[in-house]
């Protein structure tokens, strides 16, 4: 997700007034703010983003709800949703308001990377955690900010994981293809750095291919260079752009069914996997959330299925939403919100819990964050089997 450029920025008094009003009146259903004396003690995890992104990650929200329900009265914590309408300006104004709202303990952002990059300093100044649920730019994480976290594996770490996979498959010469966009170029940087450490030669690196002619030329070049694997990092905004990625895969696999192709989460689309299924077997991408298959995650998925019988099975997002909320809640346990002179702010307690040296043992496995706010995860992968992405090793 990267922000479309070229629109104007509107900083007018009327817009600011409207946003300030929305910050005090936009809760939904059970999340509507209380007006009694207890409201002053209650702390909030604010969900900030656009309907299209938030509703597309309902499993993450469901996981949050399960965690809040289980935390119960051990901590006065709830969630509230703030819809920025996908607007850059509105998103920044809302972020500034939330950063300065004493009720808000942390913000979980479902926003475009450009917005997160611009608003990060609000939360740093307020000493309040900003959690990028679906990731952010590498440069955001490398600014030395203490209160910005990415619950997605970072772009460079994704690329490094792809290179490790190639090394495990005995690849000695590989190529990288990207869309000349920030996140994707950082994935390639991570791949190239790890490839060098693994003794893999990155013999070709290009933006594109963007046409059949460019694809034909690239494939001939890869063959001539003895390349046996491709790391394909393609950002897409339209269905046509998404379909092109799979046509590239089909073109290569028609000529060499054993050619190793890796990508990222942009490859995950059930309709495309079905359409191009015969060419997709073994296509791999690094698992973007830090999730380890254990008995605890099996038990969590069973509880999730019982609570949400009409929803799809609990995915990695549900596990992450549950664990991130549990972590925030446990960091705040024992705080009743009445002490106005606490030696540590709520945000600092959450930051320290997230960055604890011992980590947190959640349903997703052990979760820990680096000083940069990167989630520290062992390399794990999704591979296509029978036109569906499954965890690596589950069918081998």
Image (cartoon, rainbow, N blue to C red):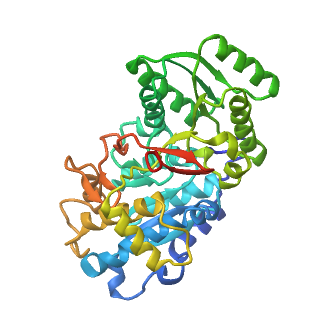
Residue 96 vertical placement versus 1 (above, below):
below
Spot the residue most to the front: 396
Residue 45 in percent (x, y) is at 41, 67
Quadrant in the rendering for residue 114: top right
Q: Residue at x 78, y 44 (%)?
A: 240
Q: Is residue 309 left or right of residue 215?
A: left
Residue 66 vertical placement versus 171 (above, below):
below
Q: Residue at x 30, y 41 (%)?
A: 371
Residue 7 in percent (x, y) is at 72, 46
Residue 353 vertical placement versus 309 (above, below):
above
Residue 384 in percent (x, y) is at 57, 46
Tell me if I can see residue 76 in this picture.
no
Tell me if I can see residue 112 in this picture.
yes
Q: Is residue 243 left or right of residue 320?
A: right
Q: Residue at x 65, y 52 (%)?
A: 269
Decide which of 217, 23 is in the foreground and name it.
217
Residue 385 vertical placement versus 52 (above, below):
above
Q: Residue at x 42, y 54 (%)?
A: 131
Decide which of 158, 9 is in the foreground and name it.
158
Quadrant in the rendering for residue 328: bottom left
């Amino acid at each position: 997700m990267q922000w479309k450029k070229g629109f104007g920025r509107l900083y007018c008094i009327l817009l600011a007034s409207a946003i300030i009003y929305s910050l005090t009146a936009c809760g939904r259903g059970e999340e509507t703010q209380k007006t009694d004396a207890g409201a002053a003690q209650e702390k909030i995890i604010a969900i900030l983003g656009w309907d299209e992104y938030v509703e597309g990650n309902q499993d993450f929200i469901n996981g949050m709800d399960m965690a809040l329900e289980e935390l119960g009265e051990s901590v006065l914590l709830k969630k509230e949703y703030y819809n920025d309408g996908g607007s850059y300006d509105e998103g920044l104004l809302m972020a500034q308001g939330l950063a300065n709202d004493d009720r808000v303990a942390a913000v979980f952002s479902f926003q475009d990377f450009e917005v997160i990059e611009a608003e990060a300093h609000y939360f740093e100044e307020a000493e309040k955690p900003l959690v990028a649920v679906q990731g952010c730019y590498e440069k955001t994480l490398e600014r030395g900010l203490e209160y910005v976290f990415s619950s997605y594996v970072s772009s460079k770490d994704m690329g490094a994981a792809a290179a490790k996979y190639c090394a495990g498959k005995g690849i000695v010469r590989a190529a990288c293809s990207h869309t000349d966009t920030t996140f994707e170029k950082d994935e390639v940087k991570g791949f190239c750095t790890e490839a060098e450490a693994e003794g893999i030669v990155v013999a070709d690196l290009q933006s594109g291919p963007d046409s059949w002619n460019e694809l034909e030329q690239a494939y001939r070049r890869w063959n001539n260079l003895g390349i046996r694997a491709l790391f394909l990092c393609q950002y897409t905004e339209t269905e046509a752009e998404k379909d092109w990625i799979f046509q590239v895969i089909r073109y290569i696999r028609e000529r060499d069914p054993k050619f190793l192709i890796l990508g990222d989460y942009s490859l995950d689309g059930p309709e495309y996997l079905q359409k191009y299924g015969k060419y997709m077997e073994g296509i791999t991408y690094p698992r973007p959330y830090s999730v380890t298959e254990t008995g605890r995650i099996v038990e969590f998925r069973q509880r999730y299925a019982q609570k949400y019988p009409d929803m799809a099975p609990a995915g990695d997002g549900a596990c992450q939403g549950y664990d991130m909320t549990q972590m925030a809640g446990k960091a705040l346990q024992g705080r009743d919100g009445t002490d106005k002179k606490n030696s540590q702010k709520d945000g600092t307690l959450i930051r320290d819990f997230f960055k604890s040296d011992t980590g947190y043992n959640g349903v997703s496995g052990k979760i820990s964050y680096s000083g940069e706010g990167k989630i520290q995860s062992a390399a794990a992968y999704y591979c296509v089997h029978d036109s569906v992405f499954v965890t690596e090793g589950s069918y081998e």
